[in-house]
């Protein structure tokens, strides 16, 4: 068996798989050992850790991180804060790694169900893991994930090209909202956090978030706030974490958190001043985030999970996210 299993959190560092993340075109920020280690430290207290390392001729060629819940094993990351889940491997090794992961889990035993969520339908891991499980004689079911859609937007090479690619109605709406906000409140500026301003900027972002109505306003509990602050502290120095605000007269009216990773900008979270709801500061800021992503040379803007109507106003298409359930019998 080529799959080796570990429940030791030190292996996030000792067996660092960052090189495999870069080699796997389907990998995201959520695949990195830094992100998964942080998630584990903040939310893994009641979960059993199970790291799987696949080797070929003594070289580590694939990794998957799991939560061991006893009779159920699922990818590490949960469903609330981690949008995409799954193994990582270079393209030449993906089929081998999928097979070794399934056969290794079967040989290890002790589970009744593999509940594998967060698998994009248009990436190879869903099909490879399904095929490997079927070949191992296991029961397999593919269903929609809890959040079954992650709208996705390929980007043009410039802001003008992006706008020109949109239907005229969408293009007009993006421009109209920005003009309306400026005409009512004055000129706005877009400000990105730095290491020096991160703490106070996150204070404002959390304040905006908690002012929201419904479940969103209750999301940023103290434990979640700590997680977000640690994300910033970990990934902002690497220019991956971007906390961006729309400001008018030095007042922050809307904020977004995004990840710029391997040519894709992912819109992770957002909040805005609800007193200015009628002027759509959040929508204007998302448009400016797309402009910034293009300026940073990104080829895609990922709206991440959540089938919200506003995401399609920027030209995103529906990207399906699946759940693969594998049962031992």
Image: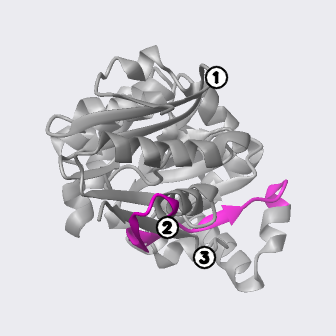
Relative to residue 73, is residue 271 drawn left or right? right
Relative to residue 175, is residue 38 drawn left or right? left
> Front-most of 171 and 226?
226
Q: Nearer the viewer, mark 2 or mark 3?
A: 2
Instruction: Say whether disc 2 or disc 1 marks the residue closer to the N-terminus.
Output: 1
Q: Nearer the viewer, mark 3 or mark 1?
A: 1
* Mark 3 vs mark 1, CA separation in Å: 49 Å
The colouring scheme, among rainbow, by chain, secondary structure or one colour, is: one colour
Is residue 272 in the magenta section?
no
Q: Image point 52% across, 61% down: which residue?
A: 135
The residue tagged 3 is 313
Under circle 1, the secondary element is loop
Estimate the x, y position of residue 288 in percent, counting from the top left. Answer: 63, 55
Under circle 2, the secondary element is strand
In this rendering, the answer to whether 29 lies above or below 209 is above
The residue tagged 2 is 321
Dot 1, crowdedness within 10 Å: few (<14), some or many (≥20)?
few
Q: Which stretch appears magenta? A: 135-160
Relative to residue 192, is residue 324 drawn left or right? left
> Front-most of 64 and 208?
64
Instruction: Say whether disc 3 or disc 1 marks the residue closer to the N-terminus.
Output: 1
Estimate the x, y position of residue 202 in percent, counting from the top left. Answer: 35, 37
Q: Are marks 2 and 1 in contact (CB under 8 Å)?
A: no
The residue tagged 1 is 57
Dot 2, crowdedness within 10 Å: few (<14), some or many (≥20)?
many
* Mark 2 vs mark 1, CA separation in Å: 34 Å
Under circle 3, the secondary element is loop
User: Can I make out residue 245 in this image?
Assistant: yes
Instruction: Say whether disc 2 or disc 3 marks the residue closer to the N-terminus.
Output: 3
Q: Image point 29% across, 22% down: which residue?
A: 8
Dot 3, crowdedness within 10 Å: few (<14), some or many (≥20)?
some
> Front-most of 133 and 291?
133
């Amino acid at each position: 068996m080529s799959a080796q299993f570990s429940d030791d959190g030190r292996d996030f560092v000792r067996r660092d798989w960052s090189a495999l993340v870069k080699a796997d075109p389907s990998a995201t920020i959520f695949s990195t050992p830094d992100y998964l280690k942080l998630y584990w430290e903040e939310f893994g207290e009641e979960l059993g850790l199970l790291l799987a390392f696949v080797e070929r001729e003594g070289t580590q060629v694939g990794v998957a991180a799991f939560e061991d819940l006893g009779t159920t094993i699922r990818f590490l990351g949960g469903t609330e804060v981690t949008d995409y889940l799954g193994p990582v491997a270079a393209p030449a090794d993906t089929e081998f790694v999928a097979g070794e992961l399934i056969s290794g889990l079967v040989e290890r035993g002790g589970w009744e169900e593999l509940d594998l969520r967060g698998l994009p339908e248009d990436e190879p891991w869903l099909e490879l893991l399904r095929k490997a499980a079927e070949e191992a004689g296991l029961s397999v079911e593919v269903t929609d994930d809890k959040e079954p859609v992650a709208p996705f937007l390929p980007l043009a090479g410039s802001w003008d090209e992006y706008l020109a690619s949109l239907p005229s109605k969408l293009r007009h709406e993006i421009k109209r909202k920005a003009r309306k906000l400026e005409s009512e409140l004055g000129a706005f500026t877009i400000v990105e956090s730095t290491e020096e301003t991160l703490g106070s900027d996150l204070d404002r972002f959390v304040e905006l978030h908690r002012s929201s109505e419904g479940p969103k306003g209750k999301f940023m509990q103290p434990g979640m706030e700590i997680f977000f602050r640690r994300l910033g502290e970990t990934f902002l120095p690497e220019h991956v974490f971007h906390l961006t605000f729309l400001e008018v007269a030095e007042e922050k009216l809307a904020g977004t958190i995004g990840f710029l990773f391997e040519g894709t900008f992912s819109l992770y979270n957002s909040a805005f001043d609800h007193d200015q709801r009628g002027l759509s500061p959040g929508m204007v800021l998302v448009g400016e985030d797309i402009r910034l992503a293009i300026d940073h040379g990104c080829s895609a803007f990922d709206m991440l999970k959540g089938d919200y109507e506003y995401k399609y106003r920027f030209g995103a298409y529906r990207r399906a996210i699946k759940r693969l359930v594998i049962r031992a019998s």
